[in-house]
Image: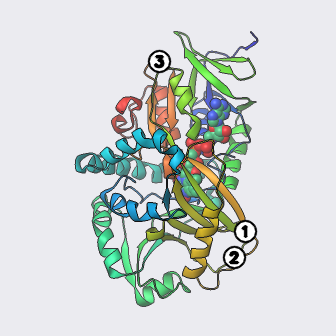
Amino acid sequence: MPTSASPSNEIVIVGAGIVGLATAFHLLAEGHRVRLVERGGVAEGASYGNAGALAFTDILPLASPGMLRKAPKWLLDPLGPLSIPPRYLPQITPWLIRFWRASLPDRYAASITAQGNLMRFAATATQALVTQAGLAEHLRSDGNLQLYESEGELAASLPGWEARAREGIALEHVRGERLADLQPGVSPRFTVGTFTPHWQTVGDPYHYALALFRMVMARGAGLVHGEVVSLTAHAQGVQLRLADGKVLNAGRAVIAGGAWSRPLAKSLGDSIPLETERGYNTTLPPGAFELRRQLTFGGHGFVVTPLSTGIRVGGAVELGGLKAPPNFKRSEAMLTKAAQFLPGLRTEGGKQWMGFRPSLPDSLPVIGPATASARVLYAFGHGHLGLTQSAATGRLIADLVAGRRPSIPLEPFRPDRF
Ligand SMILES: Cc1cc2nc3c(=O)[nH]c(=O)nc-3n(C[C@H](O)[C@H](O)[C@H](O)COP(=O)(O)OP(=O)(O)OC[C@H]3O[C@@H](n4cnc5c(N)ncnc54)[C@H](O)[C@@H]3O)c2cc1C
C-alpha cells in the first residue's frame, strides 16, 4: 500500500471549507505544520454560497418552542421554509426525536448559554483573525434587520429577544420612520422590525474563504487533493486512508468535513447524529435592489443579503439528506416572495445554489477529541452558523492541540454528548 510519510508533528485537516481553513490559520500561527485534504474544490461546500452573515447575535437553538409552534404550518407548504421529503422521513426520524428533546426547557436554556458563550468568543476571534490575516476589507458592519408583519408576530418572538438581551445582545425594536430609514422600500405589510447592530456580513463568503486559503498557503500550509475514507489513531499518530488507496501519516488530524463528517467519525468508533439541513438561494446581479443591510424575513424562513457580488435571497431548511438532487423550486419560491416583500427587486439574471448545512439536533457544533484518541479532533456540525463560528472553532482547536485551557468551556460541545 503506497504511503505518504508525514513528520509526526504535522497536523492533517480533512476539509478545506471555512472551518478547516480557519483551523489551519490558527494552527499555523502556533508554529504547526499543516496539510489540508480536500476532495473537491477549496470552499466549494456549504462555505461557497451561504448568506454571508456573521450572526453573532443568533444564539437561539433552532429546536425552540417557537420553531415547534411554526413547524406544522411550514410543513404543510411543500415549498415552504421547512420541508421533509417523505422518502427521507424514516432516516431522519431519530434526529427529529433528538431535535424535539433539545427544545425541552432545561436543554433549550443550556444551549442558549453555550451558544451565547461561543458567539461572544466568535465575535472576538473573528475580529482577531480578519486583522491578523489582512481580511478586514471583507467585513460589513451594518447589522441585521428582522421584519414582522404585525405587532402580534413581534410579540410572539419577544421571549427569544429577551433571552438574547439577557446574554448581553444589543437590539432595538423599530417602527415608522426608524424602520424606513434602516431599509427604505420594504412592502408596507411589514410594520415592525428588530435591529441587531452588532451582526456583520462578509462581502462574499466564497471570496472571504479563498482569501483565507491564499493566506494559509502563503504561510506554508500544504494541500492534498483526495477523499479521506477512514482514520486510525495509534500511540504515535494518525493514519488517514484515501479513496485512491494512499495513506497519509500525521501526528494529529482534525475532521472539518462539514456535512460529510459522520462516516469519518464513525471510522473511529464515534456515532454522531450529524444530518444535513439543505438550504437554497438565488444570487441576483449587483444593483438588483438598494439594500442597506441584511434583512431577515423570519416568518418566511429566508434572508436577503447585500454582497459585493450581488443580492442573495435564500434560506429554507430541507431535511432531505446528502444524496437527493436539488429542488430549485425552493429558490424560486423564496425569490417570488422577496419580490413581493421588496417591491422593485429586479429578479432577472439570478444564479441558483443549494448547500448542505452540517447540523446537529441541538444546534451546537462538535468541538473536541475523538473518543478513541485525543490525536483526532472534531470540528464540524455548525449548522446555520459555520461561517460565524469558524474563527472561534479554529482557535478552540488550537487550544486543544496546545493542551491549554480552552478559551470557553467546551463541555456543551463534546462529541460524546449524544
Ligand atoms: C443556504 C445557506 C445559508 C447559510 N448562511 C449562513 C450564514 O449566513 N452565516 C453562517 O455562519 N453560516 C451560514 N450557513 C452555514 C455555513 O455555510 C456552514 O455552517 C459552513 O459553511 C460549514 O463549513 P464547513 O467548513 O464545516 O463545511 P463545508 O464548507 O461544507 O466544507 C467541508 C469540506 O470538506 C470536504 N470534505 C468532506 N468530506 C471529505 C473527505 N472525506 N475527504 C476530503 N474532503 C472532504 C468537502 O468537500 C468540503 O469542501 C449557511 C448554509 C446554507 C446552506
Residue plotted at (71% across, 33% down): 220
Q: Are marks 1 and 2 in contact (CB under 8 Å)?
A: yes
How packed is label 3: few (under 14 Cα within 10 Å), some, or many (20 or more)?
some
Task: Decide: is 387 above or below 142.
Answer: above
**Where's the N terminus, which quadrant?**
top right
Marks 1/2: CA distance?
7 Å
Do the residues under discs 3 and 2 have CB atoms within 8 angstroms?
Answer: no
Determine the residue positioned at 38% across, 61% down: 72
The CA span between labels 3 and 2 is 51 Å
Disc 2 under 8 Å from ligand 1? The reply is no
The mark closer to the camera, 3 or 1, is: 1
Residue at the spot of label 1: 350
Q: Which residue is mark 3?
A: 373
Dot 2, how many residues are within 10 Å of its Cα: few (below 14), some (14-19), or many (20+)? some
The correct choice, above or below, for 123 with respect to 14 in the image is below
Residue 55 percent coordinates (x, y): 48, 59
**Observer able to see residue 200:** yes
Between label 3 and label 2, give the one nearer the viewer: 2
Q: Position of residue 365 (x, y in %)?
A: 45, 41
Looking at the rendering, the quadrant in which ligand 1 lies is top right
Location of residue 156 (image quadrant): bottom left
Residue 294 found in image quarter = bottom right
Up-down: is 27 above or below 6?
Answer: below
Q: Residue at x 60, y 29 (%)?
A: 31
Residue located beneath label 2 in the image: 347
Q: Closer to the N terminus: mark 3 or mark 2?
A: 2
Where in the figure is residue 56, as x and y percent of width and height? 45, 57
